[in-house]
Image: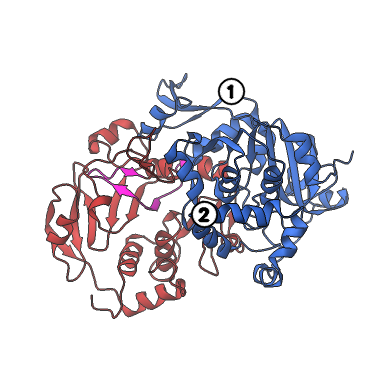
Chain colours: A blue, B red
Amino acid sequence: MSKLTTLHDAVAAHVHDGDLIYAAGFTHLIPFAAGHEIIRQARRELVLARATPDLIYDQMVAAGCARKIIFSYSGNPGIGSLRIVRTALEDGTLAWEEYSHFAMISRLTAGASGVPFMPMNPTGVDDLPKANPSYRTVADPYSGRPVVTVPALHPDVAIVHVQRADAEGNCHLWGILGEQKEAAFAAARVIVTAEEIVDPAVIRSDPNRTIIPALVVDAVCHVPFCAHPSYTQGYYDRDNAFYLEWDRLSAEPARVRAWLDEWVFGLPDRPAYWEKLGAEAHDRLRVEPRWSEPVNYGQY
Amino acid sequence: MSQPGLTPSELMTVNAARLLRDGDVVFVGVGLPNLACNLARRTHAPELVMIYEAGVIGAQPARLPLSIGDPTLVSGALSVVSMWEIFAYYLQRGLVSVGFMGGAQIDRFGNVNATVIGPYAKPKIRLPGSGGSMEIAAWADRCYYITPHEKRRFPPRVDFQTSAGFLGGRAEREAAGLRGGGPAAVVTDLGILEPDETGELVLGAVHPGIDPEQARAQTGWELRVLPALRTTVEVTPDELSLLRQLDPQRIYLN
């Protein structure tokens, strides 16, 4: 059954006020277009979970979508501070729950696996566990030694961007896989955005690359360039200049509002955004091909 | 400083690179640690295996990675794995020999604060938080840090322990049962701090032309100086030229 729909309709149907959202992607494949659509549809009181909130959550917090943030590294990757989230945490206007990267992915893995928690070896420090009561220490039932646990995370909605998907939502991903698969399996509802919608035969030609199966997917949206200013491996480069520009721009609330007006509220969708970016950006972000060797699955 | 125009970042990065051994499996942080590892791979440690927390094993970046998840790390890498696998199978399982990180604040026993200045619930300055560092500091065989030598970065005790050094001292870390050995060196622009038998960071080396008193003045505790204080070897023209090729736009080597 085809689950193809527009990003507008997918967000309207699956993202509700107050939901816990996990927009996945470790630097790579961050679904910015979905974040912008959520901003346009004025969702409120969201709980935004991501290992690295990145600019997508900085923008959603700036637009007033969020009540709380769950994270493990709140910086502008490779550049410095994530200013809007940081200011909101310092001012006490945004609630937060904090983990390490490993605890964050452990929570998702537990959620994706249908178990209540995940054990981890101790790290020697307890300031964060003291500040966040979701961290617990229990005795390993076999050795008696202490293990640290974190509870399963079950997002209401996961949003995952992928290189290609068929209309049912079987997805091929490559490059940095981050927490895409775990977020999709842990969530109650899954929106997929894809650079390309392909025939199921393309998916079936390379089943080991089907990281996310249609079984867990609710909506499939064809959204080329969805990840800009992050990137899609093999399709376009990361727009580091924008990450730098955001660092300057986000220091001034008036400029942030003007940016949201111009680039989010002032545009209907991602094709309009990509066109507005212009030829210079398109050229700058273009990437030369580097193909893998095909593998032989055999005709059985 | 003998090399014309040698900057503090270059001095730190070259000295950090020299600490790596050929064959080390390094969990690489972005910025100066990344430059140091790439420099080591191009000089004395060609068999260095670079692991990035985004899940890339054996990266051979063709250009300077501008973030921990830069696509140049992926193309030509040995393997790309999920976030779960990099932290569980590689780090927790015990395959990583070196953790290489920057540090906002490092205290007398090598504990690092990357989380908050002031009370946690009402932050004066909110820093990015742990990322991968909480587990890297605990489970890598040994850890190196690169940070400028400023008093505010070296308090006697950090406000918040984001990741473990020797906690209250080496015995406390041992009692915690962590698989990794803890901080092995902190490279600054004045010299190199190393843990003594109690786990306290002491001045093991100064860079050429640096007076140990300069380091003592920029340290928040009564910094002890090793009786056999060393002077680091001058940065060579080859090291400097290779390093500058790695960051031609001087994004990190400012």
Which x, y percent locates residue B59? Answer: 54, 60
| Near-viewer residue (A241 or A29) | A241
Q: Amino acid at mark 2?
A: Ser
Under circle 2, the secondary element is loop
**Among all residues in the image, which is located at the extreme right?**
A1
Whether residue A170 can be seen here: no
Is residue A89 on the magenta stretch? no
| Near-viewer residue (A166 or A221) | A221
Cα separation, mark 1 vs mark 2, equals: 39 Å
Q: Which mark is residue A116?
A: 1
Region of the chain picked out in magenta, as a range: B91-113
Q: Residues within 10 Å of mark 1 (few under 14, many from 20)?
A: few
Q: Quadrant of the N terminus of chain A?
A: top right
Who's the residue at 27% across and 40% down the image?
B166
* Relative to A299, A238 lies left or right: left
Which x, y percent locates residue B244? Answer: 41, 75
Q: Amino acid at mark 1?
A: Pro
* Relative to B109, A266 lies left or right: right
Q: Which residue is the site of mark 2?
A: A250
A2 relative to A201, above or below: above
| Near-viewer residue (B36 or A76) | A76
